[in-house]
Image (cartoon, rainbow, N blue to C red):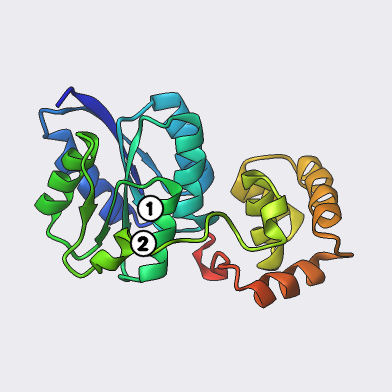
Amino acid sequence: MQAVRALVVDDHPVFRRGLRSLLADEPWVTGVGEADTVAGAVERAIDDQPGVVAMDVRLPDGDGIDATARILERRPQTAVLLLTMIGDEDIVRRGLAAGARGYLLKDTDPDAVVDALRTVGQGGLVLGPRVPTSCLTTPVAAGPPAPFDRLTARERQLAEQLAGGRTNGQIARVLGVSEKTVRNAVSAVLAKLAVPDRLAVALLARDVGLVLPRQDQHR
C-alpha cells in the first residue's frame, strides 16, 4: 500500500504510545500522531491528514464514533479502525454506519491491530473474532436519537457535556474554546432542543438513552 500517516486516538497514554511505537516501525507508515479527546482527534486529523486512524470508542469528551463521523465528513478517504474494551453489537453497527472500516477489541494481539490498520488502509474491512457478523447485514438507525438529531455534531458534543453536569468552564476546557463561546452555544442548544435549562437537557438525554461521557474521565 502507499505509505500514509497514522493517528492513534486513546485517552490511556500507555496504550496510545505503545501502539504509536509499533506503527512507527512499519514501512507503510510515514508518521504517527496522537490524540486523547474527540476534539483533539478531529483537529489532528484535519492538520495531519492521516490515511488510517486507530480510534478508541470511549473518550473523555464524548464518543469515538461521533469523532469518526466528524473526521470522515472532512476526510472521507481516511480509514478508521475502532478499538474498545467491549464487543457490543450496537457499537459495531453505529461505528460501521458512521463510516468506520473495522472494529477490534483492545485485548487483541498488538501485531494483529497493526495488521488490521494496514488492511483498512488498503480498503478492507476488519471485524474482530468476537464481533458478530450479523452486524454487517443488520440495518442500523443512522444518526443520534431525536431531538438530538436537530443539533450539529459540535452542538451535540456540547449537549452531552451539559447533560453530564459540567460547568461552562469545564466544557470550555474540554472543547478548547472560551467560556463566552460556550455560553452562546448553550443558548442555541437549549433553543434547538426546546428545553428551558441544563437539567432538562440531562433528563432528555436520559430518556432517549444518549450515551454520556463519564465524569471520572475528565482530568
Query: Residue lying farthest right?
Result: 196
Mark yes or no: residue 25 visible. yes
The image quarter containing residue 215 is bottom right
The quarter in which the N terminus is drawn is: top left
Give the percent coordinates (x, y) of residue 125: 23, 47
Nearer-the-camera pick, 90 or 42: 90
Residue assigned mark 2: 92
> Is disc 1 in contact with disc 2, using a CB cutoff of under 8 Å?
yes
The amino acid beneath tag 1 is Leu
Q: Where's residue 51, x and y in %?
A: 30, 30
Q: Residues within 10 Å of mark 1 (few under 14, many from 20)?
A: many
As displayed, is residue 75 above or below residue 149? above
Q: Nearer the viewer, residue 136 or 143?
A: 136
Q: For the residue marked with disc 2, what is the amino acid?
A: Val
Residue for point 41% across, 64% down? 91
Residue at position x 15%, y 43% in the image: 22
Mark 1: secondary structure: helix
Looking at the image, is 19 positioned above or below residue 147?
above
Tag shown at residue 96:
1
- 191 displayed left or right of 16: right
Q: Is 165 situated above or below 168?
A: below
